[in-house]
Amino acid sequence: MDTERTETVIIGGSQAGLAVGYHLAQRGRDMVILEGSERIGDAWRNRWDSLHLFTPARHDSLPGWAFPAKGWSFPSKDEMGDYLEAYATKFRLPVRTGVRVDRVSRRGDGYLVEGGGRRWEAANVVVATGPYQTPKVPGFAAALHPDIRQFHSSAYRRPSQFADGSVLVIGAGNSGVEIALEAARTGHRTTLAGRHPGNIPFDIEGTASRLFMERFVLRFLFHRVFTLHTPIGRRVEPKFRAHGGALIRVKPKQLDAAGIQRTGRVTGTQDGRPVLEDGRVLDVGTVAWATGFGRDFSWIDTGPLRPDGEPSHERGVVEDRPGMYFVGLHFLHAMSSSMVHGVSRDAEHIARHIAEDPRTTRSPQLAASPAGT
Protein backbone atom coordinates (compact mmCIF):
# COMPACT_ATOMS: atom_id res chain seq x y z
CA MET A 1 0.00 0.00 0.00
CA ASP A 2 1.41 3.38 -1.02
CA THR A 3 2.00 5.95 1.69
CA GLU A 4 1.66 9.68 1.07
CA ARG A 5 3.58 12.17 3.17
CA THR A 6 2.28 15.54 4.25
CA GLU A 7 2.81 17.90 7.15
CA THR A 8 -0.77 17.81 8.47
CA VAL A 9 -3.71 15.48 8.04
CA ILE A 10 -7.08 17.05 8.93
CA ILE A 11 -9.74 14.41 9.61
CA GLY A 12 -13.16 15.84 8.78
CA GLY A 13 -14.09 18.18 5.94
CA SER A 14 -17.03 20.12 7.39
CA GLN A 15 -16.82 23.61 8.89
CA ALA A 16 -14.18 22.82 11.53
CA GLY A 17 -11.82 21.00 9.18
CA LEU A 18 -12.22 23.56 6.40
CA ALA A 19 -11.54 26.44 8.81
CA VAL A 20 -8.29 24.80 9.96
CA GLY A 21 -7.41 24.16 6.31
CA TYR A 22 -7.97 27.81 5.45
CA HIS A 23 -5.73 29.07 8.26
CA LEU A 24 -3.00 26.56 7.42
CA ALA A 25 -3.16 27.50 3.73
CA GLN A 26 -2.82 31.18 4.65
CA ARG A 27 0.43 30.21 6.40
CA GLY A 28 1.65 28.20 3.44
CA ARG A 29 1.48 24.83 5.14
CA ASP A 30 1.27 21.44 3.46
CA MET A 31 -1.84 19.42 4.33
CA VAL A 32 -4.63 17.10 3.23
CA ILE A 33 -8.24 17.13 4.47
CA LEU A 34 -9.98 13.73 4.62
CA GLU A 35 -13.79 13.74 4.44
CA GLY A 36 -15.80 10.55 4.87
CA SER A 37 -18.78 11.68 2.79
CA GLU A 38 -18.73 11.52 -0.97
CA ARG A 39 -19.45 15.24 -1.19
CA ILE A 40 -18.33 18.17 0.94
CA GLY A 41 -21.28 19.48 2.95
CA ASP A 42 -23.18 16.19 3.15
CA ALA A 43 -22.98 16.24 6.94
CA TRP A 44 -25.49 19.11 6.62
CA ARG A 45 -27.45 17.91 3.59
CA ASN A 46 -28.16 14.56 5.24
CA ARG A 47 -30.30 16.06 8.01
CA TRP A 48 -34.05 16.52 8.07
CA ASP A 49 -35.57 18.44 5.18
CA SER A 50 -36.98 21.42 7.09
CA LEU A 51 -33.87 22.13 9.17
CA HIS A 52 -32.61 25.72 9.24
CA LEU A 53 -29.69 27.05 11.23
CA PHE A 54 -30.34 28.74 14.56
CA THR A 55 -27.93 31.56 13.74
CA PRO A 56 -28.43 34.20 11.02
CA ALA A 57 -26.29 34.13 7.87
CA ARG A 58 -24.06 36.95 9.12
CA HIS A 59 -22.83 34.54 11.80
CA ASP A 60 -22.57 31.48 9.56
CA SER A 61 -19.41 32.43 7.69
CA LEU A 62 -16.04 30.71 7.68
CA PRO A 63 -12.87 32.85 7.58
CA GLY A 64 -12.23 34.73 4.35
CA TRP A 65 -15.69 34.53 2.78
CA ALA A 66 -19.03 35.83 4.07
CA PHE A 67 -22.00 33.52 3.75
CA PRO A 68 -23.71 34.54 0.48
CA ALA A 69 -27.16 35.41 1.82
CA LYS A 70 -28.96 38.29 3.48
CA GLY A 71 -27.41 38.88 6.88
CA TRP A 72 -30.59 38.30 8.84
CA SER A 73 -31.80 35.23 6.93
CA PHE A 74 -31.52 31.74 8.44
CA PRO A 75 -29.90 29.35 5.95
CA SER A 76 -31.33 25.91 5.27
CA LYS A 77 -29.20 22.83 5.83
CA ASP A 78 -28.76 22.46 2.04
CA GLU A 79 -27.61 26.07 1.69
CA MET A 80 -25.05 25.46 4.43
CA GLY A 81 -23.82 22.30 2.73
CA ASP A 82 -23.49 24.08 -0.62
CA TYR A 83 -21.62 26.95 1.03
CA LEU A 84 -19.05 24.56 2.53
CA GLU A 85 -18.55 22.84 -0.82
CA ALA A 86 -18.10 26.19 -2.60
CA TYR A 87 -15.77 27.37 0.17
CA ALA A 88 -13.40 24.43 -0.35
CA THR A 89 -13.40 25.14 -4.09
CA LYS A 90 -12.91 28.90 -3.69
CA PHE A 91 -9.78 28.48 -1.57
CA ARG A 92 -8.59 25.34 -3.39
CA LEU A 93 -8.39 23.36 -0.18
CA PRO A 94 -7.01 19.83 -0.70
CA VAL A 95 -10.03 17.78 0.35
CA ARG A 96 -10.21 14.04 -0.39
CA THR A 97 -13.83 12.94 -0.20
CA GLY A 98 -15.07 9.41 0.41
CA VAL A 99 -12.21 8.63 2.79
CA ARG A 100 -13.27 7.33 6.20
CA VAL A 101 -10.34 7.10 8.56
CA ASP A 102 -9.99 3.70 10.21
CA ARG A 103 -6.92 4.22 12.34
CA VAL A 104 -4.45 6.82 13.59
CA SER A 105 -1.26 5.52 15.16
CA ARG A 106 2.14 6.84 16.16
CA ARG A 107 4.92 6.67 13.56
CA GLY A 108 8.23 7.92 14.94
CA ASP A 109 7.66 11.49 16.13
CA GLY A 110 4.61 11.80 13.87
CA TYR A 111 1.51 9.83 12.90
CA LEU A 112 0.26 7.25 10.43
CA VAL A 113 -3.32 7.77 9.21
CA GLU A 114 -5.10 4.89 7.46
CA GLY A 115 -8.43 4.93 5.66
CA GLY A 116 -10.10 4.10 2.37
CA GLY A 117 -7.29 1.71 1.45
CA ARG A 118 -4.73 4.54 1.65
CA ARG A 119 -2.17 5.76 4.17
CA TRP A 120 -0.67 9.12 5.08
CA GLU A 121 2.36 9.90 7.21
CA ALA A 122 2.20 13.31 8.88
CA ALA A 123 3.81 15.33 11.62
CA ASN A 124 0.37 16.54 12.74
CA VAL A 125 -3.16 15.17 12.92
CA VAL A 126 -6.14 17.47 13.46
CA VAL A 127 -9.31 15.62 14.48
CA ALA A 128 -12.21 17.72 13.17
CA THR A 129 -14.95 15.10 13.16
CA GLY A 130 -17.29 17.28 15.24
CA PRO A 131 -19.46 16.58 18.27
CA TYR A 132 -22.16 14.53 16.49
CA GLN A 133 -20.56 11.16 15.80
CA THR A 134 -22.29 8.11 17.29
CA PRO A 135 -26.08 8.17 17.83
CA LYS A 136 -26.99 7.30 21.42
CA VAL A 137 -29.93 4.96 21.98
CA PRO A 138 -30.60 3.15 25.28
CA GLY A 139 -30.23 -0.60 25.41
CA PHE A 140 -33.95 -1.23 25.96
CA ALA A 141 -34.66 0.07 22.45
CA ALA A 142 -34.01 -3.48 21.24
CA ALA A 143 -36.88 -4.70 23.42
CA LEU A 144 -39.50 -2.60 21.63
CA HIS A 145 -42.03 -4.62 19.64
CA PRO A 146 -40.93 -5.10 16.01
CA ASP A 147 -44.20 -3.53 14.84
CA ILE A 148 -43.05 -0.20 16.30
CA ARG A 149 -41.04 1.82 13.81
CA GLN A 150 -38.06 3.45 15.49
CA PHE A 151 -35.20 5.65 14.34
CA HIS A 152 -32.67 8.08 15.79
CA SER A 153 -32.99 11.78 15.00
CA SER A 154 -29.86 11.47 12.82
CA ALA A 155 -31.87 9.24 10.46
CA TYR A 156 -34.96 11.46 10.38
CA ARG A 157 -35.66 13.28 7.10
CA ARG A 158 -39.38 13.96 6.74
CA PRO A 159 -42.82 13.15 8.27
CA SER A 160 -43.45 10.29 5.83
CA GLN A 161 -41.13 8.22 8.04
CA PHE A 162 -43.73 8.13 10.82
CA ALA A 163 -45.83 4.97 10.84
CA ASP A 164 -49.59 5.06 11.29
CA GLY A 165 -50.69 5.75 14.84
CA SER A 166 -49.21 7.72 17.68
CA VAL A 167 -45.64 9.03 17.77
CA LEU A 168 -43.36 9.10 20.81
CA VAL A 169 -40.36 11.42 20.60
CA ILE A 170 -37.82 10.67 23.33
CA GLY A 171 -35.59 13.64 24.10
CA ALA A 172 -36.93 17.18 24.52
CA GLY A 173 -33.97 19.19 23.21
CA ASN A 174 -33.95 21.22 20.01
CA SER A 175 -34.01 18.23 17.65
CA GLY A 176 -36.71 16.46 19.64
CA VAL A 177 -39.14 19.37 19.76
CA GLU A 178 -38.80 20.11 16.05
CA ILE A 179 -39.44 16.46 15.16
CA ALA A 180 -42.39 16.34 17.56
CA LEU A 181 -43.92 19.43 15.96
CA GLU A 182 -43.64 17.89 12.49
CA ALA A 183 -45.32 14.72 13.75
CA ALA A 184 -48.18 16.64 15.37
CA ARG A 185 -48.69 18.94 12.41
CA THR A 186 -49.06 15.94 10.09
CA GLY A 187 -51.92 14.47 12.11
CA HIS A 188 -50.14 12.15 14.54
CA ARG A 189 -51.03 12.09 18.21
CA THR A 190 -47.64 12.97 19.65
CA THR A 191 -45.98 12.54 23.03
CA LEU A 192 -42.69 14.26 23.88
CA ALA A 193 -40.73 12.61 26.67
CA GLY A 194 -37.87 14.21 28.56
CA ARG A 195 -36.79 17.07 30.76
CA HIS A 196 -37.62 20.55 29.51
CA PRO A 197 -34.23 22.27 29.01
CA GLY A 198 -35.62 25.80 29.15
CA ASN A 199 -35.98 28.14 26.21
CA ILE A 200 -34.91 31.57 25.09
CA PRO A 201 -37.78 34.01 25.71
CA PHE A 202 -38.02 35.61 22.26
CA ASP A 203 -38.42 34.77 18.58
CA ILE A 204 -34.95 34.29 17.10
CA GLU A 205 -36.10 35.85 13.82
CA GLY A 206 -37.66 38.90 15.47
CA THR A 207 -36.47 42.36 16.46
CA ALA A 208 -35.61 41.34 20.04
CA SER A 209 -33.24 38.71 18.68
CA ARG A 210 -31.40 41.27 16.57
CA LEU A 211 -30.92 43.52 19.58
CA PHE A 212 -30.26 40.91 22.24
CA MET A 213 -29.30 37.49 20.90
CA GLU A 214 -26.84 38.67 18.25
CA ARG A 215 -24.95 41.25 20.27
CA PHE A 216 -25.23 39.85 23.78
CA VAL A 217 -25.72 36.08 23.47
CA LEU A 218 -23.70 35.12 20.38
CA ARG A 219 -20.93 37.70 20.45
CA PHE A 220 -20.55 38.19 24.20
CA LEU A 221 -21.90 35.29 26.27
CA PHE A 222 -21.23 32.32 23.99
CA HIS A 223 -17.94 33.63 22.60
CA ARG A 224 -16.29 35.50 25.47
CA VAL A 225 -18.00 34.79 28.80
CA PHE A 226 -18.83 31.07 28.64
CA THR A 227 -15.28 29.83 28.09
CA LEU A 228 -13.08 27.36 29.96
CA HIS A 229 -10.92 30.30 31.05
CA THR A 230 -13.69 31.94 33.12
CA PRO A 231 -15.19 30.67 36.39
CA ILE A 232 -18.75 30.92 35.08
CA GLY A 233 -17.80 29.11 31.87
CA ARG A 234 -16.27 26.23 33.85
CA ARG A 235 -19.50 25.95 35.84
CA VAL A 236 -21.69 26.00 32.72
CA GLU A 237 -19.59 23.52 30.72
CA PRO A 238 -20.51 20.24 32.54
CA LYS A 239 -24.20 21.19 32.58
CA PHE A 240 -24.10 21.97 28.87
CA ARG A 241 -22.45 18.62 28.11
CA ALA A 242 -24.93 16.71 30.26
CA HIS A 243 -28.18 18.39 29.22
CA GLY A 244 -27.50 20.44 26.09
CA GLY A 245 -28.63 24.00 25.51
CA ALA A 246 -32.00 25.69 25.86
CA LEU A 247 -34.65 25.51 23.15
CA ILE A 248 -33.89 28.13 20.54
CA ARG A 249 -36.57 28.20 17.87
CA VAL A 250 -39.47 26.33 19.47
CA LYS A 251 -41.38 27.61 22.49
CA PRO A 252 -43.45 25.52 24.95
CA LYS A 253 -46.63 27.35 23.88
CA GLN A 254 -46.10 26.05 20.33
CA LEU A 255 -45.94 22.49 21.65
CA ASP A 256 -49.13 23.06 23.63
CA ALA A 257 -50.91 24.62 20.65
CA ALA A 258 -50.00 21.59 18.52
CA GLY A 259 -51.57 19.27 21.11
CA ILE A 260 -48.28 17.59 22.03
CA GLN A 261 -48.41 15.79 25.35
CA ARG A 262 -45.25 16.28 27.42
CA THR A 263 -44.16 13.62 29.90
CA GLY A 264 -41.20 12.56 31.99
CA ARG A 265 -38.54 10.04 31.04
CA VAL A 266 -39.04 6.69 29.34
CA THR A 267 -37.53 4.08 31.64
CA GLY A 268 -37.93 0.80 29.74
CA THR A 269 -40.45 -1.47 28.07
CA GLN A 270 -43.35 -3.71 29.00
CA ASP A 271 -44.59 -6.32 26.53
CA GLY A 272 -42.67 -4.45 23.83
CA ARG A 273 -44.23 -1.07 24.60
CA PRO A 274 -42.42 1.97 26.05
CA VAL A 275 -42.94 2.64 29.77
CA LEU A 276 -42.85 6.10 31.34
CA GLU A 277 -41.31 6.82 34.72
CA ASP A 278 -44.80 7.16 36.21
CA GLY A 279 -45.56 3.58 35.14
CA ARG A 280 -47.78 4.34 32.14
CA VAL A 281 -47.38 2.12 29.09
CA LEU A 282 -47.74 3.84 25.71
CA ASP A 283 -49.25 2.28 22.60
CA VAL A 284 -47.40 3.96 19.74
CA GLY A 285 -46.59 3.30 16.12
CA THR A 286 -43.31 5.21 16.02
CA VAL A 287 -40.52 6.00 18.46
CA ALA A 288 -38.08 8.76 17.46
CA TRP A 289 -34.93 8.81 19.56
CA ALA A 290 -33.72 12.41 19.96
CA THR A 291 -31.28 11.23 22.60
CA GLY A 292 -28.10 12.85 21.38
CA PHE A 293 -24.73 11.56 20.33
CA GLY A 294 -21.66 10.02 21.86
CA ARG A 295 -18.10 10.17 20.65
CA ASP A 296 -15.99 7.25 19.54
CA PHE A 297 -12.25 7.80 19.34
CA SER A 298 -11.35 4.10 19.47
CA TRP A 299 -9.77 4.46 16.03
CA ILE A 300 -7.02 6.62 17.57
CA ASP A 301 -4.48 4.19 19.02
CA THR A 302 -3.84 4.98 22.68
CA GLY A 303 -6.23 7.90 22.25
CA PRO A 304 -5.71 10.93 24.51
CA LEU A 305 -8.94 10.39 26.45
CA ARG A 306 -10.10 11.28 29.93
CA PRO A 307 -12.03 8.71 32.01
CA ASP A 308 -15.30 10.25 30.74
CA GLY A 309 -14.27 9.54 27.14
CA GLU A 310 -13.63 13.18 26.26
CA PRO A 311 -10.29 14.11 24.65
CA SER A 312 -7.66 15.42 27.04
CA HIS A 313 -6.50 18.73 25.61
CA GLU A 314 -5.84 22.38 26.31
CA ARG A 315 -7.87 24.44 23.84
CA GLY A 316 -7.56 21.66 21.28
CA VAL A 317 -3.85 20.99 21.79
CA VAL A 318 -2.99 17.54 23.18
CA GLU A 319 0.01 18.45 25.27
CA ASP A 320 1.35 14.94 25.91
CA ARG A 321 1.09 13.92 22.22
CA PRO A 322 2.91 16.57 20.17
CA GLY A 323 1.24 17.10 16.81
CA MET A 324 -2.26 15.92 17.80
CA TYR A 325 -5.12 18.42 17.87
CA PHE A 326 -8.91 18.56 18.19
CA VAL A 327 -11.30 21.20 16.85
CA GLY A 328 -15.08 21.57 16.52
CA LEU A 329 -16.04 19.87 19.80
CA HIS A 330 -18.52 21.23 22.33
CA PHE A 331 -16.77 23.65 24.66
CA LEU A 332 -13.34 23.09 23.11
CA HIS A 333 -12.68 26.62 24.36
CA ALA A 334 -16.09 28.29 24.58
CA MET A 335 -19.77 27.51 24.16
CA SER A 336 -19.40 28.79 20.59
CA SER A 337 -16.68 26.24 19.73
CA SER A 338 -19.03 23.80 18.01
CA MET A 339 -20.96 26.58 16.25
CA VAL A 340 -20.09 27.91 12.81
CA HIS A 341 -19.45 31.43 14.08
CA GLY A 342 -17.11 30.20 16.82
CA VAL A 343 -15.06 27.53 15.09
CA SER A 344 -12.75 29.92 13.19
CA ARG A 345 -11.16 31.27 16.36
CA ASP A 346 -10.30 27.76 17.54
CA ALA A 347 -9.10 26.77 14.06
CA GLU A 348 -6.77 29.77 13.90
CA HIS A 349 -5.36 28.88 17.33
CA ILE A 350 -4.58 25.34 16.13
CA ALA A 351 -3.07 26.55 12.84
CA ARG A 352 -0.86 29.02 14.69
CA HIS A 353 0.31 26.27 17.05
CA ILE A 354 1.21 24.03 14.08
CA ALA A 355 3.07 26.84 12.31
CA GLU A 356 5.11 27.59 15.46
CA ASP A 357 5.88 23.95 16.26
CA PRO A 358 9.67 23.48 16.12
CA ARG A 359 9.19 19.89 14.85
CA THR A 360 8.03 21.19 11.48
CA THR A 361 9.33 23.62 8.93
CA ARG A 362 7.45 25.89 6.55
CA SER A 363 6.38 24.26 3.31
CA PRO A 364 7.95 26.42 0.57
CA GLN A 365 5.83 24.96 -2.22
CA LEU A 366 2.74 26.48 -0.57
CA ALA A 367 4.28 29.76 0.48
CA ALA A 368 1.90 31.85 -1.62
CA SER A 369 -1.57 32.67 -0.33
CA PRO A 370 -4.31 30.46 -1.81
CA ALA A 371 -6.17 31.72 -4.83
CA GLY A 372 -9.67 32.98 -4.57
CA THR A 373 -9.12 35.58 -1.82
Image: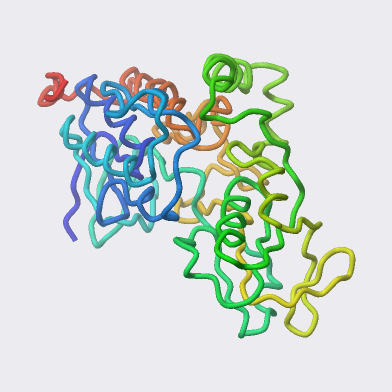
Task: Please state the horizontal and vertical placement of residue 163, each as a whole percent of the image.
Answer: 56, 76
**Residue at 54% in and 14% down:** 215
Residue 179 sits above or below residue 32 on the image: below
Relative to 66, 75 lies left or right: right
State the residue in front, 230 or 156.
156
Relative to 280, 110 lies left or right: left
Task: Please state the horizontal and vertical placement of residue 351, each as a whole percent of the image.
Answer: 34, 24
**Residue at 15% in and 34% down:** 92
Residue 118 sits above or below residue 164 on the image: above
**Residue at 89% in and 64% down:** 278
Q: Quadrant of the N terminus?
A: bottom left
State the residue in front, 66 or 89.
66
Residue 130 sits above or below residue 26 on the image: below
State the residue in front, 4 or 71.
71
- State the scheme by which the image is colored: rainbow
Relative to 356, 337 lies left or right: right
Q: Residue furthest right?
A: 278
Task: Please state the horizontal and vertical placement of residue 333, each as a whole percent of the image.
Answer: 55, 25
Residue 135 lies in quadrant: bottom right
User: How many numbered circles does the render carry?
Assistant: 0
Task: Please state the horizontal and vertical placement of residue 28, each as a whole percent of the image.
Answer: 19, 22
Q: Quadrant of the C terminus?
A: top left
**Residue at 20% in and 42% down:** 5
